[in-house]
Image (cartoon, rainbow, N blue to C red):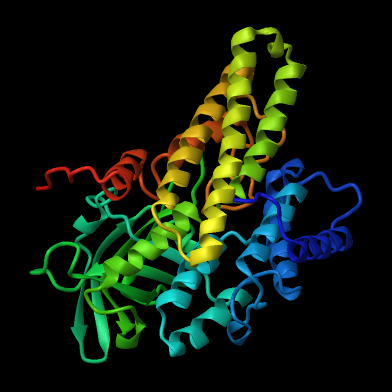
C-alpha cells in the first residue's frame, strides 16, 4: 500500500479547492460555527450547489446524471469538503445517494437506473431505509413485514422502526418477507416503495438527545409496482448485504479527516480548561491521536482494496467496529474533560458528522453531551459491535458459527 495519491488525483484536488474558494465566504469557519437553524439552511443550499456543479454522484456514470469520475476522485472530494467543514451530501443523501443509489448501480435493472438515479441526484426523490423492526434489529433476518404479490403489485403489511427522515422522504427501500415457508435468509425481497399513499402511516419518535429525525413506519395494505423489486424475488438478502457494506465501510478513507478535526478541537478545549496538566487526560488524548492515525492508515488500506476490486468485503466490519468504538470513547473523554460544563451548550458542536444519516448537520443540543449520546448510538446502528465481531470471527478468522435457534 502506497498512502500517496497519484498526480491525477492531486490535479482534481486542486479543482475542488478552487471550487471551495469560489463558493465559500473568506471568513468561513466551517458549518460547526453556525447556529443550528443556520446550519440546516446552509446544508440545503450547499447540497444544491454541489449538484449544480457536478459534485454529487461524482463516480456515477454520466448516463445516469453522474460525473463519470473515479472512486479515488470521490474520496479526494470528500476529504477536501471535510477539511473545509462543509457536508459532502444533503440530509437524506446517505440513504438516497450512498445507499439506495449505489445499490441500484450494482443490482438495479437498466429501467430502474434510468428512472431513479437522476431523480436521486436532483433531490426530487428522497429516500429512507426500511430495515429494522421492533423484533428484528441486529438479527435482521428475523423480520416479519410481509409482501404478497397481487396482480401487478406487491401489497405490504407490517412495521418498520428507526426510519431516519421518513417524514421528509417520498420513497423507502424495504426488506419484506415474500416466502414465509423459506429459511429466514432465503424468503426476503428488496422492494422500492412510495411513501405517499393511503397504506402508509409514519409516526415521529423523539430520542434522548431531543432529536425527532427517527420514525416508525406502518404498512397496512401499502402497494408498490411489481417491477420495483431490486435483484431477485426472495433474493433480497444478498442485496441487503450490499447496502450494509456501503453503510459500514464506504467512509473508511474519509472518516479519519472528520475525527481528526473533532479531536483537534477537543485538545484545544482541554488546553483552554487547563486539563492538559492532568497526566491521565493527556495520556488518553495521546491514545485518541494514535487511534485516529491507525484509522487513517486502515482507511487507506480499505480504499486500496476498493479501487482494486470495486467491492468492500469484511473490511467494512473492521472499519465500522473500529471507528464506532473510538467515537464512543472519545466523546466520553470529552465529557470528562468538561466536567459539569458538559451539561451546558457550548455554542457550536464538535466538528464531527455525528450520524451517518445526518451528514454535516450539528447535533440537536450542539454540545459534547449530545455528541456522547450519538457516540453510544454509533456502536449500535448499521450493525452492533457484537454483530461486527461475529462477522469477522466467522468470515475472516474462520471460527465456527454460533448455534442458532
Residue 222 vertical position relative to residue 98 in the rendered view, above or below: below
- Give the x, y percent position of residue 27: 90, 47
Q: Residue furthest right?
A: 26
- Give the x, y percent position of residue 273: 73, 15
Q: Dividing the picture into quarters, in which one does residue 68 lie? A: bottom right
Res 196 seen here: no
For image coordinates 59% across by 10% down, the residue present is 280
Residue 116 vertical position relative to residue 343 in the rendered view, above or below: below
Left or right, residue 12 beside residue 198: right
Left or right, residue 269 beside residue 362: right
Between 376 and 156, the residue placed more toward the observer is: 376
Q: Dividing the picture into quarters, in which one does residue 200 lie? A: bottom left
Left or right, residue 177 beside residue 111: left
Res 218 seen here: yes
For image coordinates 52% across by 61% down, the residue present is 306
Report the number of numbered marks. Answer: 0
- Give the x, y percent position of residue 380: 38, 42
Left or right, residue 354 beside residue 324: right
For image coordinates 56% across by 52% down, the residue present is 358
For image coordinates 49% across by 63% down, the residue present is 95
Between 341 and 108, the residue placed more toward the observer is: 108
Q: Residue furthest top?
A: 278
- Give the x, y percent position of residue 309: 48, 66
Amino acid at each position: 500500500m502506497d498512502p500517496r495519491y497519484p498526480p491525477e488525483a492531486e490535479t482534481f484536488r486542486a479543482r475542488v479547492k478552487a471550487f471551495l474558494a469560489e463558493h465559500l465566504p473568506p471568513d468561513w469557519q466551517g458549518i460547526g460555527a453556525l447556529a443550528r437553524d443556520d446550519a440546516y439552511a446552509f446544508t440545503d443550499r450547499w447540497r444544491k450547489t454541489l449538484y449544480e456543479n457536478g459534485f454529487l454522484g461524482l463516480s456515477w456514470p454520466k448516463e445516469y446524471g453522474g460525473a463519470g469520475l473515479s472512486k479515488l476522485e470521490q474520496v479526494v472530494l470528500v476529504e477536501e469538503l471535510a477539511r473545509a467543514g462543509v457536508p459532502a451530501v444533503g440530509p437524506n443523501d446517505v440513504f438516497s445517494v450512498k445507499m439506495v443509489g449505489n445499490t441500484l448501480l450494482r443490482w438495479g435493472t437498466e429501467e430502474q437506473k434510468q428512472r431513479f438515479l437522476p431523480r436521486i441526484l436532483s433531490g426530487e426523490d428522497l429516500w429512507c431505509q426500511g430495515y429494522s423492526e421492533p423484533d428484528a434489529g441486529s438479527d435482521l433476518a428475523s423480520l416479519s413485514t410481509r409482501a404478497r404479490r397481487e396482480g401487478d403489485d406487491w401489497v405490504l403489511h407490517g412495521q418498520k422502526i428507526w426510519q431516519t427522515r421518513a417524514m421528509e422522504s417520498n420513497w423507502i427501500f424495504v426488506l419484506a418477507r415474500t416466502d414465509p415457508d423459506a429459511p429466514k435468509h432465503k424468503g426476503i425481497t428488496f422492494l422500492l416503495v412510495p411513501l405517499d399513499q393511503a397504506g402508509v402511516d409514519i409516526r415521529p419518535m423523539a430520542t434522548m438527545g431531543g432529536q425527532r429525525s427517527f420514525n416508525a413506519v406502518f404498512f397496512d395494505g401499502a402497494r408498490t409496482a411489481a417491477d420495483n423489486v431490486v435483484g431477485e424475488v426472495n433474493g433480497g438478502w444478498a442485496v441487503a448485504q450490499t447496502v450494509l457494506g456501503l453503510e459500514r465501510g464506504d467512509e473508511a478513507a474519509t472518516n479519519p479527516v472528520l475525527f481528526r478535526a473533532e479531536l483537534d478541537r477537543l485538545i484545544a478545549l482541554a488546553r483552554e480548561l487547563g486539563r492538559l496538566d492532568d497526566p491521565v487526560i493527556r495520556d488518553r488524548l495521546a491514545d485518541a491521536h494514535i487511534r485516529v492515525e491507525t484509522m487513517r492508515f486502515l482507511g487507506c488500506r480499505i480504499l486500496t482494496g476498493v479501487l482494486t476490486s470495486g467491492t468492500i468485503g469484511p473490511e467494512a466490519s473492521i472499519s465500522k467496529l473500529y471507528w464506532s468504538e473510538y467515537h464512543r470513547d472519545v466523546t466520553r473523554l470529552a465529557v470528562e474533560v468538561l466536567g459539569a460544563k458538559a451539561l451546558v451548550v457550548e455554542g457550536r458542536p464538535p466538528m464531527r458528522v455525528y450520524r451517518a444519516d445526518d451528514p454535516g448537520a450539528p447535533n440537536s443540543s450542539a454540545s459534547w453531551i449530545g455528541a456522547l449520546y450519538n457516540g453510544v448510538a454509533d456502536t449500535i446502528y448499521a450493525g452492533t459491535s457484537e454483530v461486527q465481531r461475529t462477522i469477522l470471527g466467522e468470515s475472516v478468522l474462520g471460527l465456527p458459527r454460533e448455534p442458532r435457534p
